[in-house]
Image (cartoon, coloured by chain):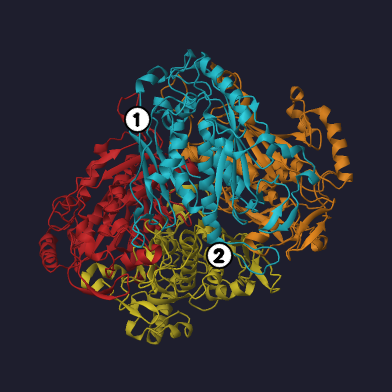
Chain colours: A red, B yellow, C cyan, D orange
């Protein structure tokens, strides 16, 4: 991945700062002829939009997306479709309150990108974190919405499975629940626990981490490529590139280290829909290639570094300071991370699909059949 | 990363199958004028070489590397140095026993890349896993040895911190110990536990997972780049691309999800050598850019899928089979993974260094100073 | 180069159609700390702006550029500088008259990209050529203006050396003249010839080709890299990617085919400023690497395909048609091509400079000196 | 294109010096299931092999290619096919006479890459030109042979159309003739003229330039992509990257500058096989996308810089010298350039085909039809 571009054939270049006039992305390599309207993108942006609850940043942003290029009416249907040329998406920033940030213009928030940007570049847009703001993830979500247009038959959904020290009870895991609470929690019983925890965190001016789990079903066998374009390696990069991400695992992930070979090996059988796996410790990826089982990943998010509790730090002049960060911050960035995780998985899968189609023509071989099937 | 190439400016392309005539890599973009002999590479290959103990594969391979291009005598020193042109490295395969694998030519080992390669390509070199064999990692280690020539002042070392369910006691962590036992264990007291565990695994024809930790010290602030070339995203991709890797975390990683903002934020101070962090939950990376603190990552390896216990599976004809894998396999691929993890980190850091030098000229800004310093 | 991105480290992604709401580009990888204002870009856009004379399209576009990201005030100077993050530039389209194009919505203009886009994508924005319009080159010129900020000490200038069958007299070549006439002609005596020719072409509803020559002085030795990132190969790709370009040559170019080895070999001597070449048949590039001599290239532009004379063609329904193109077209696209050629050379050189700095640290070895000099 | 890699999906990385132990390439991204034997590659290497006539270098190299990876027996046919994994090709150098070059170890041949490599890298393998030797083109030809396996239905052939000042008579152009003389001349009557010219050049210790024309027929409409992956831009880069190339043109190329719009626009009609063009000034490419007409390009080669006539130059110490180059050199590198030009076109087309298949699924829309056809 290049500095601000990810993907190989479905390529997304994002730009913009938290408090600049706008942010956006350019999506290149999208197949032509796919219906695409601003509404199809907006619906996903709503999922990550700030200001939607008391446990996310109170910044009010409509996040209205404009499509500036790459779409034209299809003479056959009359509706707007992708043309195969670059799709430029733009989201204006409307609720920037730059004065909030004047105190930290030259200070380095502990645990924040402030110091690293200063060391590397010597100059940075400090307002709201500038380029390092989670606001950039709006562009990812917009790109993910376009990626989903390519992924017919694939369903991607994320859930928050841990907030702070409180993990869900996996025996109660129910995807339907994620749409019933503001935390994308798949476990109804955890909601009140998290509410209480977040209320404590919020009142204390603190923050808390989280773990997001994502699942993509309907991914056929054959996507991804050994060895350095492995589907899991691409997912790892895409997910680790999200703000505040500190860990990524596929399938059983770190737990697999404690497994025996017998426990780990997902047995195979032929079912009505083809190859089936009795378990899915692999998380749908073997040898870097999808197997047809659900692709499963988890991402660990650290607590946001902007907290009210004073912390010892430095400023650009090299002076020791005590720093507390005011402003409108997410106490748990992981919650709004869920739609971003979905979007990144969508982009990676769309890219893998195009690469697979390039090298092989698409489709896959199945046991008992002589030819590649669609 | 492309299919079989990784890196952007320090680019490594690997090739070769487990039981083909040879394997190797081409390293492109290496700076000129760096002393490089086969011995400088061989010393690292020795660390991952098979046949060195009873807990790794008994395949006997000298793994002697040849430098076929990219090095010439320096007229100033008379010694061989890199010329800036591609460095082609070749390692011959000498102990291929292809007959060992005839039984599984058309069978899919559960948990192995067999089925995924079949589905994608329809044809595969099944001998010893072909391209999906861990033997490919010899090329990575060779490339890592070249990367280290670029990384003056950086020390990269890996330790195995868990085998199966047995984790080290971190209070006894001692890097010096990693050179005193065949497991790269940094905790002397764990060695006998692991020996016993591995003996049980080996005798049972089973296998076990592991976790490898890696640390790079001496990395200056400023390497890596937001947002999709983040140093941690690049590390995640590189480490997840290693055979059998299922998880990657940076710094406190998944544990950070349970932290509060106060716990997680590494406080900063000015010390004798510049900026110092009181803790290192960030693992040396903030906003995708190195901070000068040690870069720390962990990789989870699943147990190898080649086990003697019969498992239910399929073959290419679509028939249900009971499969047990004979042959010479590592009961714990994570052990030999340690030098590979080091090598991948070396390659990622060398690449990040060159990219940083490209965009900024190198060096970094420091608090209290007006200009970029080397 | 990717579909709509060019460059490796100085990367430019352009987007936009002729008659969409806007067009623009995202520039990634730019070094930080370079002063950059909209005015610094606007001055170059003025050079290629339509509506400036009767021999270029009469479309009236202010081509006012906005910088949406990547620039922030430098705390040391107070002025806006690049921050090292992506620079998003946007130019609104204000004078689109889409009705002009309704007749050709489903017709293929001979010599135009119409049919090729239809065959590839099945859908296209036909208004004004959509993505294939020369209007896209405004984004290239804007990017070139940013590239020039990096190229301290390098002067890039282009001249039109042939329009239709009328070539300049090279004995009268004078760069100063290019600023004295609307054709970028370096030969004062050719101006009236070209005026007469273009008047005839314009009145006849026809068009004419041209050749543009570009020279970059101040390029130090060492930029470019063998073998597939050769400076001349990169220039060839960048220049051939300009609308209507059909040929690129470096130095003596096609004429070199008729030379003897003695005639072609530029002899070398040490002058006051270092290595000097008595001639420059090489055009400043040997083995794909700059030599310190001026980099010289020429680009051939075909006549624009939009002409009033009826031509036999097809439409999307497969019907034979007679087609004449109304609208506001350049009779000689090569004239406005001159600033575009300059811009592409600037981008290629900036990229080559960053790549050179990455691999070697910058600078070059000089005869008689032991060490690399800046 | 990266330093020593070209192509995006069909990627070729070459390595090796003229007088090192071997040279070769790694081909990545090749589709699986294509029959491939060493003989299929060898036949093309024979076309460019040195030592085959008195007008090419007298170096005797068998140029026997070995396939080290990426090919395995197909269980369905029993024959060797590509597996989709990287194909490593190796050619040993057997006739290196390094002593020939000792005199020029520290001298810069005028018109040669010597000085540029020195300036950039400070160290270089001077033997036989090292990495800048035309010997590297053997790897290109080998890669081109693999590319041809992908290009079913496409015929690529090159002819030499000018040597020194002597151009062919195009009215006598006959592809069959190119196989009847050692110059790939398509005009029987030019052969004796060229023989005489080359004999004079050879006896005088001089050299001469040449122009090679290449044509690819059977390329369907739709390959290539606007704007920076234009098929002609990719061809320009690939062809300009060949040693000694100084110019590239597509279709009518530089001649198009003198055309009127009427002359240049290739009219279209529907024929029995679909869209037909009455002329082909475009050289089969419009808007960067293939049209179905033959793809036509020409490459200008300068005379080789290694000549016996003394020329004024410098050495590494900065001393003025008189230099004459002994050794075994091609008096006209353009002749052996013809198979290399073919190979580069094959690689570019194979890459364009895979990219087209990725974005669109392959095939193209045709006038009068509603759906994409294969």
Mark 1 or 2: the one toward you: 1
SS state under label 1: strand
Picture layout, residue A130 above or below residue A306: above
Spot occupied by residue A91 in the image (x, y as percentages of width and height): 27, 44
State which quadrant residue D204 falls in: top right
Quickly name the residue at label 1.
A72
Label 2: which secondary element: helix
Residue ID at (69%, 49%) = D137
Measured from the top left, where is residue C148 in percent x and y? 49, 49
Can see residue A1?
no
| Location of residue C75 by image quarter | bottom left
Say if C40 sits above or below B242 in the image.
Answer: above
- Tell me the quadrant of the picture where the C terminus of chain A can be found: top left
Badge count: 2
Q: Which residue is mark 2?
A: B139
| Quarter in which the N terminus of chain A is drawn | bottom left
Answer with left or right where residue B264 lies relative to residue B141.
left
Q: How busy is the neighbourhood of tag 1: few (under 14 within 10 Å), some, or many (20 plus)?
A: many
**Residue D252 screen position, x and y as percent:** 63, 28
Local crowd size for mark 2, using a 10 Å CA cut-off: few (<14), some (14–19), many (≥20): many
Q: How far is disc 1 from disc 2 in space, using C-alphas?
A: 48 Å
Tell which of A21 and A269 is nearer to you: A21
**Nearest the camera: C292 or C236?**
C292
Q: Position of residue C136 (x, y in %)?
A: 44, 35
For the point 49% across and 30% down, which residue is it? D374
Answer whether residue D247 is visible to the viewer in this image. Answer: yes
Vertical placement of residue D123 versus C249, above or below: below
Q: Chain of mark 1?
A: A
């Amino acid at each position: 991945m290049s500095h601000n571009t990810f993907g190989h054939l479905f390529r997304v270049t994002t730009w913009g700062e938290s408090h600049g006039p706008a942010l956006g992305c350019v999506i290149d390599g999208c197949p032509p002829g796919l219906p695409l309207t601003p509404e199809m993108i907006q619906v996903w942006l709503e999922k990550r939009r700030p200001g939607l609850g008391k446990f996310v940043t109170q910044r009010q942003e409509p996040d209205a997306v404009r499509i500036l290029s790459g779409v034209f009416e299809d003479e056959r249907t009359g509706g707007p479709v992708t043309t195969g040329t670059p799709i430029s998406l733009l989201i204006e920033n409307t609720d920037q309150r730059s004065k909030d940030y004047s105190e930290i213009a030259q200070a380095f928030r502990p645990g924040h990108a402030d110091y690293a940007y200063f060391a590397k570049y010597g100059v940075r847009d400090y307002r709201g974190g500038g380029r390092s703001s989670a606001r950039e993830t709006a562009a990812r979500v917009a790109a993910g919405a376009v990626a989903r247009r390519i992924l017919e038959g694939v369903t991607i959904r994320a859930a928050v499975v841990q907030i702070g020290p409180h993990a869900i009870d996996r025996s109660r895991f129910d995807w339907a629940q994620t749409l019933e609470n503001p935390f994308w929690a798949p476990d109804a019983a955890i909601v009140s626990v998290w509410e209480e925890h977040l209320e404590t965190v919020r009142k204390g001016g603190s923050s808390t981490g989280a773990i997001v789990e994502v699942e993509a079903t309907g991914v056929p066998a054959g996507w991804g490529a050994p060895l350095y374009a492995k589907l899991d390696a691409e997912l790892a990069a895409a997910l680790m590139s999200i703000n505040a991400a500190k860990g990524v695992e596929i399938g059983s992930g770190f737990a697999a280290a404690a497994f025996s070979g017998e426990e780990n090996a997902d047995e195979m059988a032929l079912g009505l829909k083809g190859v089936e796996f009795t378990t899915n410790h692999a998380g749908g990826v073997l040898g870097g290639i999808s197997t047809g089982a659900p692709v499963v990943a988890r991402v660990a998010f650290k607590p946001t570094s902007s907290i009210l509790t004073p912390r010892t730090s430095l400023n650009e002049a090299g002076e020791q300071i005590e720093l507390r960060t005011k402003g409108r911050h997410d106490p748990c960035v992981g919650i709004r991370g869920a739609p971003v995780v979905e979007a990144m998985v969508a982009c990676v899968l769309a890219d893998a699909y195009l690469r697979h189609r390039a090298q092989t023509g698409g489709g896959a071989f199945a046991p008992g059949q002589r030819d590649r099937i669609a």
